[in-house]
């Protein structure tokens, strides 16, 4: 199963406060454990919402909203995509990680939808098209 592990933003991440050398080293060591275990598929930190945009969809209208965004507790400061055997395994990895912010932190773990989760609506033709697109993406990332 794949999961997305999201580090929730806080006042310091939204203020562009960068981690210290020690914090970077600790998180780097944790990431090295994830790599060694074959768990990590991707992971990145994100700039604060002041550098972001949102696009509001309302019928055929698209409205661009400039950051920063007010609700810090709803924002993400970084993420990983992990391949794990179960949600319990993902929880155990999160429990081992260094605190991702300088204060109380929230880390959210959510399963990634897989093909079978879509049921009969995801027809063999749609599955084939999706697999072809994924193959194209994978080929580009190898270049």
Image (cartoon, rainbow, N blue to C red):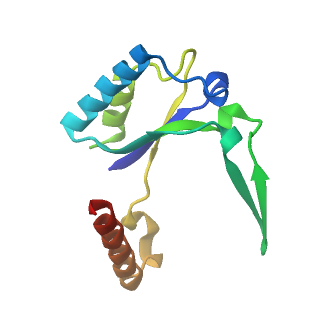
Which quadrant would residue 27 be assigned to in this image?
A: top left
User: Percent x, y for residue 64?
Assistant: 76, 58
Residue that protrudes farthest toward the left in the picture = 36
Q: Which residue is drawn at the image coordinates 24% and 29% (left, top)?
A: 33
Q: Which residue is drawn at the image coordinates 74% and 40% (left, top)?
A: 69
Q: Which residue is drawn at the image coordinates 74% and 44% (left, top)?
A: 67
- In this rendering, the answer to whether 91 lies above or below 3 is above
Which quadrant would residue 86 be assigned to in this image?
A: top left
How many numbered marks, from 0 up? Answer: 0
Left or right: where 53 falls relative to 136: right
Front-most of residues 108 and 14: 14
User: Percent x, y for residue 8?
Assistant: 57, 32
Front-most of residues 142 and 108: 142
User: Percent x, y for residue 50?
Assistant: 70, 39
Which quadrant would residue 16 be assigned to in this image?
A: top right
Q: Quadrant of the C terminus?
A: bottom left
Front-most of residues 50 and 78: 50
User: Percent x, y for residue 65?
Assistant: 78, 53
- In this rendering, the answer to whether 92 lies above or below 43 is above
Left or right: where 68 falls relative to 90: right
- In this rendering, the answer to whether 11 lies above or below 143 is above
């Amino acid at each position: 199963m794949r999961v997305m592990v999201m580090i929730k933003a806080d006042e310091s991440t939204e203020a562009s406060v960068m981690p210290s050398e020690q914090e970077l080293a600790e998180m780097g060591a944790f990431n090295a454990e994830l790599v060694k275990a074959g768990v990590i598929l991707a992971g990145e930190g994100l700039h604060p919402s002041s550098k972001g945009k949102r696009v509001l969809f309302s019928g055929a209208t698209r409205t661009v909203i400039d950051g920063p965004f007010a609700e810090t507790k709803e924002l993400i400061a970084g993420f990983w995509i992990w391949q794990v055997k179960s949600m319990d395994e993902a929880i155990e990895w999160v429990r081992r990680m260094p605190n991702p912010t300088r204060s109380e932190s929230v880390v959210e773990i959510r399963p990634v939808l897989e093909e079978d989760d879509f049921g009969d609506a995801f027809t063999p033709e749609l599955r084939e098209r999706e697999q072809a697109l994924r193959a194209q993406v994978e080929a580009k990332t190898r270049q």
